[in-house]
């Protein structure tokens, strides 16, 4: 069985579980919206948001809710004792990584489909100014975040105090994603938009994705073997 | 490792002598024309930063070796180097703002080198937290963190450099006048000797600790 096909089967399994319970989708989505709301109270003065606040709030909400989804996705495998079965499956270990990453990516992109309009609505951010560029920034940033996050969440499954350790490890390492995502989005949302800058931030994100997803893909096998 | 241990007293002695003489050399170095006395922090700040990055590189390489070869010695080097990266990082992060306050008028600036050093320092603190609280098997997980921490450095550098920068570039060091270069390289060598000595001692401690743990485990079986 090819690597991609095995990955797809694992992703499909996760999606079927998710469609039936909708646990992750509902909780993550609600958490992301709650985050936006909390920031709205902090950064809106006299009915107007501070400059660049919308971009920052959007990305922080994505990072926070993504961490929640990552932790839960693997907690579910651990509670049902299915992670061992998954790792024993007659396929290469990286296929498990690819499958989990694909499932989480899809989930986070669904959450963003709701959070981006909410940010647009509450902060008056011009989300339709450069829809393709914004979507690419979000997709590339989410891939970088989830690519590193999937590896860390998977390896922390067996560790003590994993709930605390996941954000502690994940946030410093995904700093470039946050910087590039926030700066790129702010360049689009600014009163005087700078699409060239957004473009170069996008290339930087793609470069980050290429290196870190490859690195995570390689390390998944050695990290997950006893 | 045995041969490395034999160097420790010489490294320690060398570092002690060099650190004892360093303040006199730094005192004799000429005052920098615009910053004056505060610029003397440079002679400790930059060598400490170099030691931090050296430790980070050692930790990253040792982590990669441990991850793929599962050589316990590599893990001992990795954890020792991570601790040193945190310790030398504290020196950098303490001397930096002191200097910045006088030279730039602010304690902190989100400049490329400052951000990179801070984030890298945080990665290594996270590495140590993971080892401390992760429970059994956390050394493999920590190795992945060490590897990612090393791979992260160029990205933070590029992203913040593009964003904003005011920190002096690396061009400063080669263009130093000889009266300033002498104490600078003297401090640099002192820091490297100290780094090597502590690293060797710490690796030895970690190997003994692991051997003791194995002995306990064997006794219980």
Image (cartoon, rainbow, N blue to C red):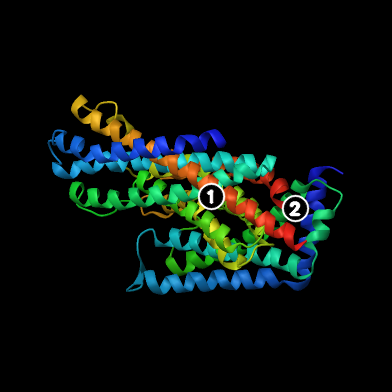
Q: Residues within 10 Å of mark 2 (few under 14, many from 20)?
A: few
Of A68 and A172, the residue lying toward us: A172
Above or below, A75 against A191 in this view is: below
Q: Position of residue B172 (x, y in %)?
A: 27, 31
What's the distance in space between the residues labelled 1 and 2, CA to CA? 25 Å
Can residue A203 be seen here? The reply is no
Q: Quadrant of the N terminus of chain B?
A: top right
Of A72 and A183, the residue lying toward us: A72
Q: Position of residue B154 (x, y in %)?
A: 47, 39
At 37% from the left edge and 69% from the top edge, which residue is drawn?
A: A43
Q: Secondary structure at mark 2?
A: loop
Q: Position of residue B201 (x, y in %)?
A: 48, 45
Query: With A51 as the anchor, is A206 left or right in this view?
Result: right
Counting labels gives 2
Above or below, B168 against A174 in this view is: above
Q: Quadrant of the C terminus of chain B?
A: bottom right
User: Is disc 1 in contact with disc 2, using a CB cutoff of under 8 Å?
Assistant: no
At 56% from the left edge and 38% from the top edge, which residue is drawn?
A: B61
Q: Secondary structure at mark 1?
A: helix
Of B130 and B12, the residue lying toward us: B12
Chain at numbered mark 1: B
What residue sits right under mark 2 in the picture? A226
Of B133 and B170, the residue lying toward us: B133
Which of the numbered marks, if any, corresponds to residue B66?
A: none
What residue sits right under mark 1 in the picture? B205
At 79% from the left edge and 51% from the top edge, which residue is drawn?
A: A8
Q: Residues within 10 Å of mark 1 (few under 14, many from 20)?
A: some
Query: With B119 as the anchor, is B23 left or right in this view?
Result: left
Above or below, A179 against B196 in this view is: below
């Amino acid at each position: 069985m090819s690597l991609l096909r095995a990955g797809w089967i694992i992703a499909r399994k996760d999606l079927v579980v998710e469609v039936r319970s909708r646990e992750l989708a509902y909780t993550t989505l609600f958490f992301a919206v709650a985050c936006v709301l909390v920031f709205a109270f902090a950064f809106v003065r006299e009915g107007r948001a501070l400059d660049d606040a919308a971009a920052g709030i959007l990305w922080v909400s994505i990072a926070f809710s993504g961490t929640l989804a990552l932790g839960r996705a693997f907690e579910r495998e651990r509670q049902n004792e299915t992670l061992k079965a998954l790792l024993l499956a007659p396929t290469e270990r990286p296929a498990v990584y690819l499958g989990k990453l694909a499932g989480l990516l899809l989930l986070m992109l669904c959450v963003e489909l709701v959070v981006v309009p909410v940010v647009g609505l509450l902060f008056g951010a011009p989300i339709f100014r450069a829809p393709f560029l914004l979507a690419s920034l979000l997709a590339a940033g989410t891939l970088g975040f989830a690519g590193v996050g999937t590896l860390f969440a998977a390896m922390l499954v067996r560790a003590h105090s994993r709930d605390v350790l996941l954000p502690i490890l994940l946030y410093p390492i995904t700093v470039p994603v946050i910087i590039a995502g926030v700066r790129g989005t702010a360049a689009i949302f600014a009163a005087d938009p700078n699409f060239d800058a957004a473009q170069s931030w996008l290339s930087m994100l793609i470069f980050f994705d290429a290196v870190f997803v490859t690195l995570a893909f390689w390390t998944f096998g050695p990290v997950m073997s006893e | 490792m045995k041969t490395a241990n034999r160097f420790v007293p010489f490294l320690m002695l060398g570092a002690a002598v060099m650190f004892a003489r360093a303040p006199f050399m730094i005192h004799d170095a000429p005052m920098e024309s615009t910053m004056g006395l505060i610029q003397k922090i440079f002679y400790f700040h930059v060598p400490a930063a170099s030691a931090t990055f050296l430790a980070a590189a050692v930790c990253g390489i040792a982590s990669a070796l441990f991850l793929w070869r599962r050589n316990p010695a590599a893990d001992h080097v990795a954890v020792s180097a991570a601790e040193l990266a945190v310790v030398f990082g504290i020196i950098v992060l303490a001397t930096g703002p002191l200097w910045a306050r006088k030279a730039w008028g602010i304690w902190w600036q989100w400049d490329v080198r400052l951000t990179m050093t801070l984030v890298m320092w945080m990665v290594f603190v996270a590495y140590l937290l993971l080892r401390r609280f992760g429970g059994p098997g956390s050394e493999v997980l920590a190795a992945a963190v060490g590897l990612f921490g090393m791979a992260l450095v160029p990205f933070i550098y590029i992203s913040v450099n593009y964003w904003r920068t005011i920190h002096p570039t690396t061009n400063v060091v080669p263009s130093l006048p000889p009266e300033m270069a002498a104490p600078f390289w003297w401090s640099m060598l002192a820091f490297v000797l100290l780094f090597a000595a502590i690293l060797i001692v710490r690796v030895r401690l970690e190997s003994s600790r692991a051997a003791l743990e194995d002995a306990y485990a064997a006794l219980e079986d």
